[in-house]
Amino acid sequence: MTVTQLKLNANKKLICPKCNGELRFSEGGAVRVVNGKVDMDATLPRHICDRCGVFYRELLGSGYYDVFDLPKEDRQVPKAPSVKPAAPVIPSIKKRVLATGDIKPSILKREADGKCPCPRCGERMNFIEAGPVQIVNGKPDFSNTIDHFICPYCRSVFRKIVGTDYFQWSEK
């Protein structure tokens, strides 16, 4: 067991003592099963060095860190900066987006392509059919258990009012 005290760089980020690169912080994830055993260590936060293939976990809030080998599936390859050709400048037309308090419940009908106009901005909204409860990051996600519309332009969500044909704006 190697215990190390990590140092901060000018940006107040922890740096790797081996390569002096910035460490990537990763909050604890979901509980995993590894080789038939429950891995509770995956739930603890850690500071990751993708170059060296190690991660550091703090010991009881002491400021000292223990070093572990990073599994290959958790590594992230640093992306090379991509050069994109300059796109022609096209003046954009800003659409008027209504405030959420000004949107009244309305009847929304899917058209042949499965979309309908957004009451808030006028763009085409996608229809999301109801599905079963999903587990996201180890927690149940009930957001897609009822039919709803999502607008990709203004990011509005319209959910059906129970027992009616009306849809109302929803926070998520």
Image: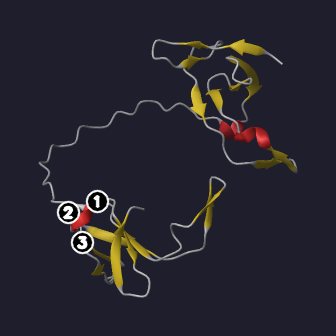
Q: Which quadrant does the N terminus fall into?
A: top right
Amino acid found under the numbered disc labelled 2: Leu
> What is the crowding at mark 2: few (fewer than 14 residues within 10 Å), some, or many (at least 20)?
few
What residue is pinned by disc 1?
153
Which structural element holds mark 1? loop
> What is the crowding at mark 1: few (fewer than 14 residues within 10 Å), some, or many (at least 20)?
some
Asked whether the beta carbons under mark 3 and mark 2 sit within 8 Å of each other, the answer is yes
Of circles 1 and 2, the one toward us is 2
> Height in image: 119 above or below 47?
below
Q: Residue at x 11, y 48 (%)?
A: 91
Which structural element holds mark 2? loop
Q: Which mark is residue 98?
A: 2
What residue is pinned by disc 3?
119
Q: Residue at x 34, y 82 (%)?
A: 166
Q: CA distance from mark 1 to mark 2?
A: 13 Å
Residue 121 in the figure: left or right of residue 10: left
Of circles 3 and 1, the one toward us is 3
Q: Residue at x 14, y 51 (%)?
A: 92
